[in-house]
Amino acid sequence: MHIQKSFCVFSAAAALLLGGCSTAPRAPEPSAASTVPSRLSPEQATDITIYALSLVGTPYRYGGNTPDAGFDCSGLIGYVYQNRAGLKLPRTVAQLQSAGQAVPREELRSGDLVVFGRGTHAGIYVGEGRFVHAPSSGGEVRLNPLDSGYWATQKMAFRRP
């Protein structure tokens, strides 16, 4: 009950944040006419995005795959996709790097996967150049820009389940 209530409150806040009115220029989002197919409807992709954002702050735990137990990066992805879209994704990052279809960066949309290195880490793209992920032991699920700090130096691949 507490998680569901928190999710509802966070969903409303996330919707305002994602659709907020800012005078600062935004990076253009890709056009709706993508050449990459998806098993997700636009509504499901939005739901995945909002739910992933609601899990920011959940503790990291190696092998974790629930909010109560904590998450590792692939556990977070599997949990979000299963619970918001009924889609079972592979459990390991190595397997995620071939899940779904490859997506060119210019066609990224919310709900796509971001896979780093040679399958060493992964997250969920949430729009405006940002992704949600469970980065490391001792950390917590967080929201980071793709193009800043450590992440900007990493090889990235994008997948659309």
Image (cartoon, rainbow, N blue to C red):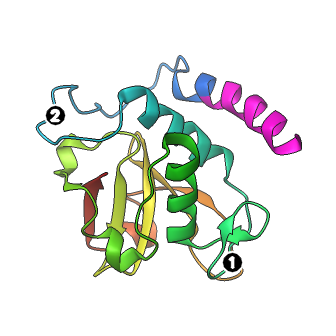
Residue 116 in sight in this render: no
Q: Position of residue 60 (x, y in %)?
A: 68, 73
**In the displayed structure, does residue 47 sit left or right of residue 53?**
left
Provide the major secondary structure of the magenta segment: helix
* SS of the residue under disc 1: loop
As drawn, which residue projects farthest toward the right? 2
Tell me, yes or no, whether the highlighted magenta stretch contains residue 2. yes
Q: Position of residue 43 (x, y in %)?
A: 44, 26
**Residue appearing at x 34%, y 67% in the figure:** 115
**On screen, residue 148 above or below 116:** above
**In the displayed structure, does residue 18 sit left or right of residue 57?**
left
Whichever of labels 1 and 2 marks the residue nearer the N terminus, that label is: 2
Residue 145: image quadrant is bottom left
As drawn, which residue projects farthest toward the left? 35
Q: Position of residue 65 (x, y in %)?
A: 63, 68
First to last magenta residue range:
1-14
Q: Position of residue 102 (x, y in %)?
A: 18, 57
Residue highlighted by disc 1: 61
The numbered mark at residue 34 is: 2
Q: Nearer the viewer, residue 82 or 110?
A: 82
Tell me, yes or no, whether the highlighted magenta stretch contains residue 90. no
**On screen, residue 96 above or below 129:** below
